[in-house]
Structures are given as C-alpha cells and as structure tokens.
Amino acid sequence: MSQADPTGDSARPRADLVIRDASQVLTCAGVPYEVGLLENAWIALAGEIIAAVGSREAVEAAVDCAGAEVIDARGRVVAPGFVDSHTHLVFGGSRVEEYAAKMTASDPAAVRAMLEERGLKTGPMATVERTRACSAAELLDSAAARLAGMLASGTTTVESKSGYGLSTESELLLLETNRALCQSSPVDVLSTFLGAHGFPEDMARDAYLGCLIDDMIPRVAAAGLAEFADVWCDDGYYTAAESRRILVAAREAGMEPKIHADAYSYIGASDLAADMGAVSVDHLNYTPRSVMGALAEAGVVGVIMPALDFAVKHPRPFDARAMIEEGMTLALATDICPGCWAESQQFVMALACRSYAMSASEAVWAATRGGAHALGLHDRGSVTPGQLADLQIWGVPTFEHVIYRLGGNVVDQVLKRGRVVVDRALKAGG
C-alpha cells in the first residue's frame, strides 16, 4: 500500500478519508466471537481499502492524513458492514394475508382452507406462482427496495438465492436479477443457485431432478450467474442422496455447495455438508450435537436465522450455544423471504441474544466476520488494514446498544468501499 517517492524514499500511503475519535471501533479481528474493541480510535482509508486503524498517533505515523476528508465519530461506534449470508431477496408478491392469519390460529390446515376459500394460495408454491407472473422489471424493482432497506440498516454484502422459479427460464431470470442488483446498488450481491428449493407442480419429481442436473446447472454455469449452489435437504424436499447428486454436479460446474439442512427434520443433510466440505450449512434446527462437532472439524460455517424461527414460530429453535461450545464458526443471517420479511441484521442480533443466549459480542462477530466466512470471503468482515472499507457508524456510545434498542436502527452512516453511501445523521439534521 505504500507509494513510491520520486526521491527513492518510501512514502507513507495517503489517506482519502479519516474517521477520527470513535468512541469504540469493533475490529472483529483475531479470536472468533470477540469484537476486538478499540477505544478512542482512528481509521484511515485509502481508496477502497482500510489503510490503518488504532490510536491517532499510530494512524498518523502509518498514513499521511493531510488533506483527507474527515468524519468525526466522537461518541459513536464504528463496526464492519454486516454480511448477510442467507437471503431469498428476489421474489414476487408477498404472503402477508397468510402470515397475518396465522397469528391467532392454532390449526395451520384451517388457515390454509380459510385462505383458499378466499382464492389465496399459501406456502412457497404460492410465491413460485407469483414470482413466475412478474416481469424482469417488477422483480428488480421490488428486490431493489428491500436491498435499500438492508443497506440503510448497515448491510454491505448480501448473498441472494434463486429458488422461487423452479423452471430453467425462471431460475435464470432470478439470478440475472441478482446480477442487475449488484450492478445498480452499492451492496455487493453474491448469487446462489437454489433450483432445488422444492418441486414444481407442473413436472414429475424425477424429470425435475434431471432438469436440475442436466439443464439448469450447465446453463447457470455457462452464464457465470452463481458462485454457489444450494439444496433444501429435508423431509418432503430433497433426500441426502439427491442432494449429493445435485451438489456434486454443481461443484464440477464451478459452484461451491451450501445446504439448507435439518430445518424440520434430520435426514443426513448436515452430515453431507461435513462430508463435502460445504461452504456453509444453514438452519440446523434438528442437528445432533455429534454432527455439530463434525461440522466444526470440517470447517463448515453454520448459518443460523433467528428471525425465521421467530416468523414461523418454529417448534424446535436451533441451539446456538451448543454449536459454539462444539467449536463451530457461526454466521447470523436474515433469511429475508416471503415467510420472513426481515431486512435488518440488527433485529436478527437482538433475537439471537435474547432468545438464543448469544452475547452481544458473539452476535456482532457472527453478523459481520462470520457472514464473510459463510461466503468464503476474506477481504471484509473486519476493521483491519488491507480489508475493504465496508463500514458502518452507529449513533450510540457503546456497541451493546445495537441489541438493546429493539426495533430501531442505530446506523448513522454506511461506507461501502470507502465511500459514504448512507448518511442518516445528515438527513436527520436537515
């Protein structure tokens, strides 16, 4: 990062922007689940990269700060941008009637019957139908609005899955929408092919499985539309054997595996994740403790989603403490989808701490550095020299406020690749 001096002497890199006098900087570097707290700290940015972090003296010794733009962070907290590693960001319509009807109902079948009498379909297949009916522009506009809400809440990197198309052309359109979102938004959007999110009503099971492997995966790979491939391995969805076939084909085509595992049953999905060395294994509600240990040993990141458990009133919430005690690396994610419309990682963190016995430090780490690990990213998720300058500044004096101020948004500013892209503090001040 140093620049050559015409005299031949090494020159300090020149800062473009300096964040000074932060009450707290959460580096999220070093030991897992520790925020790496620095007090009264400075951060110097050079272009898209963090150039120096530490005391004023240390930063000014390492970087030429003369002439740099300055953000005064006195009384505020600086953290890495959130990395949301499991979302279903692109879909058509909503299932608001279904969600509202379930609030006071004890019999899900009765809810479905009542809504069907009103001509309203329920469940994921209702979303498939509504998604297929949308134009490309409608899908892009609705997803962009959700993504803007996520950015305003501090999220700077998002994984977005397909899965509500369940046909070759529809799945390709969802992935193309991800690409368009990444090009039009400051947020980095990474794509996951999830054609194996269910089985379409207009095709036999075996025929669709063949379509996934022989048609969809090659076309997605040829177009370079996805970094990852995912499968929902659970009772009523894909078996462990079917999931292996799909993920092996995807890996051979250049997409690394992720797995929706053990969400509503244990049929070997998490074992498959460990055996294949998947990038991540997600949900984990029914995962045996012995398999948690195997996942830790295999280095597979566990992605847990408190908002999804909350939204569906899950009968068996995941056991975050057991996963941590077994040595697993965990990431927190929103799982934003029609059944769990959660844009805010702050909300997710509050649930993780209150309902799953995670500490504030563990939640911050899992929503930032853990999320980066769950996407195989090593250039973000921490506030350290050489990392991307994806940062958020919270208008609170200590980081614990992020899980304390329930339902709010502590974000004042968001920086993406060294550039301020959200400035709520300025807007609030007129």
Image: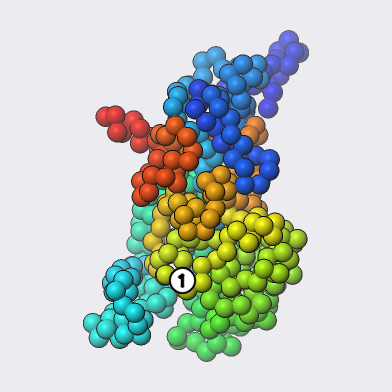
Left or right, 225 with respect to 252, comes to left
In the rendered view, would you say 178 is above or below 76?
A: below
- Classify 10 Å Cα crowding around label 1: few (below 14), some (14-19), many (20 and above): some
- Which residue occupies 72% across, 64% down? 293
Query: Can residue 225 be seen from the camera position used here?
Result: no
Residue 305 screen position, x and y as percent: 51, 61
Element at badge 1?
loop
| In the image, farthest residue toward the left | 118
In this view of the protein, which residue sits in the foreground, 187 or 430? 430
Residue 92 screen position, x and y as percent: 37, 67
Tell me where residue 241 sits by quadrant.
bottom right
| In the image, farthest residue toward the top | 7
**Which quadrant of the rendered structure holds the C terminus?**
top left
Q: Which residue is labeled 1 in the image?
A: 314
Instruction: Check the image and tell me how it is coloured.
Output: rainbow
Residue 191 screen position, x and y as percent: 55, 59
The tally of labels here is 1
Tell me the amino acid under the disc marked 1: His
In this view of the protein, which residue sits in the foreground, 110 or 156? 110
Query: Can residue 104 be seen from the camera position used here?
Result: yes
